Amino acid sequence: MSSHISNIRPQPDQVLMDIADYVVDHDIESTLAYDTARNCLMDSLGCAMEALAYPACTKLLGPLVPGSMVPDGAKIPGTRFQLDPVQAAFNIGTMIRWLDFNDTWLAAEWGHPSDNLGGILAVADWCSRNAVIGGAKSFTMRDILTAMIKAHEIQGCLALENSFNKVGLDHVVLVKVASVAVVTHLLGGSRDQIVDALSQAWVDGQSLRAYRHAPNTGSRKSWAAGDATSRAVWLALITLKGETGYPSALTAKTWGFYDVLFKGQPFRFQRPIQQWDSYVMENVLFKISFPAEFHSQTAAECAMQLHPRVKERFSDISKITIRTHEAAIRIIDKKGPLNNPADRDHCIQYIVAVPLIFGRLTAADYEDAIAADPRIDELREKITCIEDPQFTKAYYDPQRRSIANGVTVEFKDGIKLDEVVVEYPIGHRSRRNEGIPLLEEKFRISLARRFTPTQQKAIIDRCLDQAKLEATPVSEFVDMFVV
């Protein structure tokens, strides 16, 4: 006998409805969240400005058809491009992510929640320019900060207990999901349309992590988030044109996301979605000192401390041990040839060797000219990673959220230096008082690469004044970054 499959359309998956409710109904009241979001905005745009110095990034920017312009489109900070919101989201998102220097969230899944700013800023700027033309009200920068807080919360809370990397999927799926929820709302979508747009994001084809790992590591990892946030904008726009959603996109037997891509397991949550607020933004990790994969940030700090003690004795080193956590070993413990900058900034041995030798680690240190120094590979060969289960436990502890590394250097004459351990990187919430002045200086340096002193001062003054920034119309703010 045949068994007929019911064609009665179900109610939307509860996860989709709960996320939509959070986006539409939840009021963010945390002063700390808005202050952190302002710092995140500054840091993200600073990263974007620095990326414009790299031809590998700039060759991807601009319109798909060279020379075309959208007169009332979104403007791309640091450039003269004015584009449709989908391509604008790709441009901004790619610039922010290019140097692996923007904020980070580490949990069962990791990622970079500020990647969502590509879609948020592009959509809000486009909508605002057209609203002003029509005599309507523009979005303000407080609307941008609110959308950032909510996108951070969606991406980060989904990441806390759900490991997409362990099923081979790249974390940018969460950028797509978070971006589509908040930009659909910015575009005026209803609760039901946000649910539909979210379902589109989950049934979409998802990126594999092959481009982040040996032997295939490549520059796609630098534009994958730009692609995800721009895809979210496209999905939001077609949803608002009436494209239908798929209510059981997650739970449909055989064909849904859980069965096809998540080994039949539903998502787990540390806190119910109904309790989501601004936890992720308040606890986000800033990359302040080093443009490197975040699991290696404290290892780079250790190497910087060791540099004065080893800089004259590289040839005498017999062994370097990195005591680390499981996630670092899984992602960035890498031997053998490194083929490009993307390969190097995902190799903890390279990230430790460079500051040991030079007493620095900058984006330029991943380029071929520096990588050709034979001392780097000589040191890499002497570096071994070992997991410390206590480091791993502290990494997953929601009360600690440490990213600890310890580095020990041994010499051929038997001398062994005391291990240098750093538990929390300078961008961690527990080191905010130490980190924020350096983050602001990082922003100033990035602006100086692109703008006149007068323009730099105007941007900095606006960004450091919370109330004035929040009241600024979005397009007025974006125009401050036009060259």
Image (spheres, rainbow, N blue to C red):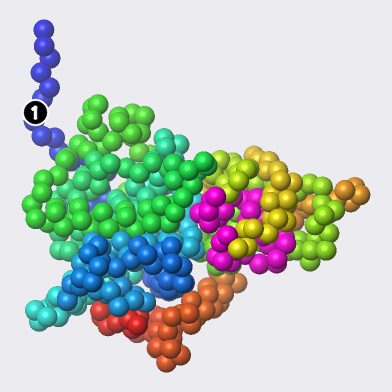
Q: Specify the amino acid type for callout 1.
A: Asn
Q: In this rendering, is residue 282 above or below 316?
A: below
Residue occupying image coordinates x 15% and y 63%: 188
Determine which residue is flagged by label 1.
7
Side of 152 relative to 135 (left or right) = right
Horizontal and vertical percent position of residue 3 = 12, 14
Q: Which region shows up in magenta?
A: 339-368
Compared with 349, 309 (above or below) is: below
Query: Would residue 448 appear left or right of 362 to someone viewing this image?
Result: left
Q: Which quadrant of the figure has residue 353?
A: bottom right
Which quadrant of the view contains residue 39?
A: bottom left
Residue at 68%, 43% in the rendered image:
385
- On the question of residue 28 being in view, the answer is no
Q: Position of residue 416 (x, y in %)?
A: 85, 51
* Main secondary structure found in the magenta portion: helix
Q: Tell me residue 463's x, y (percent).
A: 41, 81
